Amino acid sequence: MSVQDLILGLHRFWAGQGCYLAQTYDLEVGAGTMTPDTFFRVLDRRDWRVGYVQPSRRPDDGRFGENPNRVQKHFQYQVIMKPSPAGIQDVYVQSLRSLGIVLEDHDLRFDEDNWESPTIGAWGVGWQVLLDGLEITQFTYFQQCGGIDLMPVPVEITYGLERLEMFLEQKDDIYDLDWSADVSYRDLRLREEKEFSEYNFNAASVAMLRQAFNACQKEAGRLAAKDLLLPAYDMCLKCSHNFNLLDSRGAISVTERVKMISQIRSLVNDIARRYTGGKDGA
Amino acid sequence: MEFLLELLTEELPASHIRSGRDQLEAGLRKELLEARIEVRSLTTLATPRRLVVAGDFAEGQEDREEVVAGPPLAIAKGPDGALTAAGKGFARSQGVDESRLEVVRTPKGEYLGFKRLAKGTPTAEILAAAVPRVLGALSFPKMMRWASSPFRFSRPIHGLLCVFGGAVVPTSFEGLTASDETVGHRIAAPGPIKAANLASYREALRTSFVVVDPAERKAIIAGQMEAALEPLKAKAYPDPELLDNLTLSVEYPLVILGSFPETYLRLPIEVLATAMREGQHLFSVVRDSQQLPYFLGVADTPGDAKGLIRRGNERVLRARLEDARFFWDQDRKLPLRDRAAGLKNVLFQEKLGTYDDKTQRLKKIVAYLSEKLGAADVKEAAVEAAALCKADLLTEMVKEFSGLQGRMGGLYAREEGLPEDIHLAIYEHYQPVGLEDASPSTTAGAILSIADKMDSIVGAIGVGLQVTGSSDPFGLRRNAHGVCKVALDRKLRFSFPLLLDRILAIYGDRLTLERAEVKSACLEFFAGRLRFILEKKGCRYDLVGAALGPGVDQIVDVQARVEALDALKSSPQFEPFILMAKRIHNILKGLPPAKINPDLFVEKEERELYSSLSIIGSNAQPMIARGDFARAQGIIFKLQPELNTFFDKVLVMAEDKRTRQNRLGLLQSIAKMLLSIADYSQIVVEGEKPAKPKGAR
């Protein structure tokens, strides 16, 4: 089974659970949670079910293509079910079986792990799911987002696609994975990892990133004040990515770090407040 | 009659299971006690998905006689003793025959009344009401909501099995209706199971691959581990905490023995053990304290016939060890001294500055402590260790495995060829992590350990991060326990208040609170921690109170005082002496200090007491100074006969003001000397009502 088959399998499975299959969001984000299909949709009271693939960019995890497990961009399969269905753990187990995993031959564990993202004022309670000791999924009952208590409570299921694929293909090196029958992960991604590692750690212009951070921050505030909340939120995502790049360039001092994270968070919290206080849904 | 309850949940954290079991047992016991239901036995069991209570209770409350009181006798009966209209009316309204009426005597007077038998309520009925209350009262450190309900619990709940005497208890909890059904193992046998009592429940679960008793699971794991290692003549590196947590994270344990390439054995044993333990929950395997290229894991499954679980875990571990090897090689390319420069960019605490700021403070504190402890010979090593001890926070290894902080720095220092007293001091400077952990093994290490913790405590309290109730975000309690433990274990004599002064001076104007305020808050905090530590060691609370009475100057003295009191408490002189001390204490309560003028003594007895006091005082003083309180106490006992005579023959509250003041002055100097050993007034002697003071948690 290739990465592509894995994605198709998850699409088919979650579509069968009533999920709308969203397309990948077109901005750099650190996690699938940050895209509007999760961030905004968990805030209001309406039911919501969605599944999508989202590349996750973590500049600091770049290893110049030399580490078999770590990359500065990986792919998540993100599922949101709101309200969380009563039998959601069993549904998740079914999703693994639907991929052809014979769970009777393996050790599946829900291992305590409570997720949080200070930048977007979000946290939840749940587990990392371990399959024979390999972390394949983050399973979270979302409690708060944008600083707002969520009701109904969504469940977020985030599969790490490369991890799961390494399990399925029984491979030790991420670059040996098959993306499709003809294209390998190496073909697709190695050059990108090398060049972006160089960019993230050495080449990115600190001055440009700082300017961009400040400009996006200002713009987010201006747009939020006009109740243009989705554009304002996009600006926050850009802030967040610029912050991550500055961080991997080693350009952020201690006090700055705390300040910048809280700047983004307060913008995001403001957007969330306006979103829930204003119109019912977007 | 047998009771069985199972709350079926999603996977609970191990710590929640432990606390949930305790709360369930205590809650149910309390309900049954209040309902007067006899509890013959009550136990709890648990798996990650089940909180279980089983017990043997009486079938119902005992029937009991109750008294129904009616109108006052004076109204209910006439002077001739016959029932009045009111009396007859009472009998009629209660439906009792007049012949059953009798006089009921109460503190308020006599009434007409009668006795009747009240039928006891059946236990099932009581349980039906009690179970939702007990379950609803369970609380956990971190609670969550799910679906569309405001209800909060550790994790979502799915089923309630609740039977008494073979029948379902008619109850419900948060939308779950009690039944006699549950389910088996999530993967191996997820189907339904029926159970009417503990024996059939355990049996049915076992065939559905669930061992519901944690003690049994633990024994299974231990047995399988032993069997797996027998051919290798090896042992699992003991890790009781990991074993406990694994026991609570599986329903049907299977021990897996796996291996890793020998090339990773060149990594330090600490790194190997941590890479295995963290995230993957594996035990390392040793033979004659040599690490072997094997690991033990615990899976939750009936079997691994195809070896897929073993191979999967091996693959994951290999990737982690490869990372660790990379970190180990990378980190050693930059000496700690150069790395430490980067601490300017790592925040210790917003108001307290960076780790570089902390490092500079630590160098000064260890220099001070080395001198005060008369350990000038280790001063240089301690200062050097302080300069380097936080550098490992910037290593890749510690960024990945934060639990290795300190130890990694020590290992890298050793690799760099730094002397043993420096690398050991760095290695051990976070120790002891709890009261069970070992203190640093060297003097330099002990000094650095105390300095590090005291810097954190004084700083946190100085910017208002006080410990309140269950909230202790900065780990101040743990740090304070560490400081006390090092001082006590290594018998370090240094003035604690002077150390506080020194640290406060080093912090300068960084702290937001007044120095005097911070100092007294620290002293009070440590008095509370010492009380906790000593009571935990089994010392009597009143003796601890007495030992803390003179204040915390030398930490070691507080324990020495308690030990002295404890050793002497059964001597025949003890109790009379305590009573005497209390008598003096009571006389002097609230009085201003008075001066002694030996010329003003009138009676022989007071003059003699005064001269004995000077002799005994000057004998006891050096013993007190070196912390030998038992001997000092022994000497002071000798004052007892003269004190007795004094109180027999001399009137303290003499009419003449000057004589009276002089006598009070004499008692005050005795009281002062006593207080240099202990505050005896806090000691409870037989016949007194023990008033338990507010205990520190």
Image (cartoon, coloured by chain):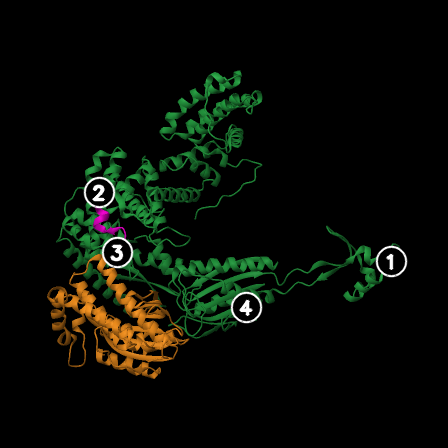
Density class for disc 2 (Cα within 10 Å; few <14, some 14-19, many ≥20) is: many
Distance (Cα) linking label 4 and label 2: 65 Å
Q: Residues at marks 3 and 1, common chain?
A: yes
Q: Could you tell me if residue A166 is visible in this image?
A: no
Q: Chain of mark 1?
A: B
Q: Which of B445 and A92 lies nearest the eye of the viewer?
A: B445
Label 2 SS: helix
Report the residue marked by disc 4: B163
Which residues, given as a range, are shown in magenta?
B351-363
Residue B363 marker: 2
- From the image, tell me which residue sits under label 3: B402
Helix, strand or loop: magenta stretch: helix
Q: Which quadrant of the figure has residue B548?
A: top left
Q: Residue at x 26, y 71 (%)?
A: A221
Residue ID at (44%, 72%)? B149
Residue under label 1, please give it.
B82
Image chain in green: B
Whichever of labels 4 and 1 marks the residue nearer the N terminus, that label is: 1
- Chain ID, mark 3: B
Counting from the top left corner in percent of width and height, residue A101 is at: 30, 76
Mark earlier in primary sequence (2, 1): 1
Q: Earlier in the sequence, mark 3 or mark 4?
A: 4
Residue type at numbered disc 1: Ala
Identify the chain drawn in orange.
A
Q: Nearer the viewer, mark 2 or mark 3?
A: 2
- Give the mark nearest the N terminus, 3 or 1: 1
Say if B679 sits above or below B136 in the image: above
Give residue A169's quadrant in the image: bottom left
Q: CA distance from mark 3 to mark 1?
A: 89 Å
- Dot 1: what SS? loop
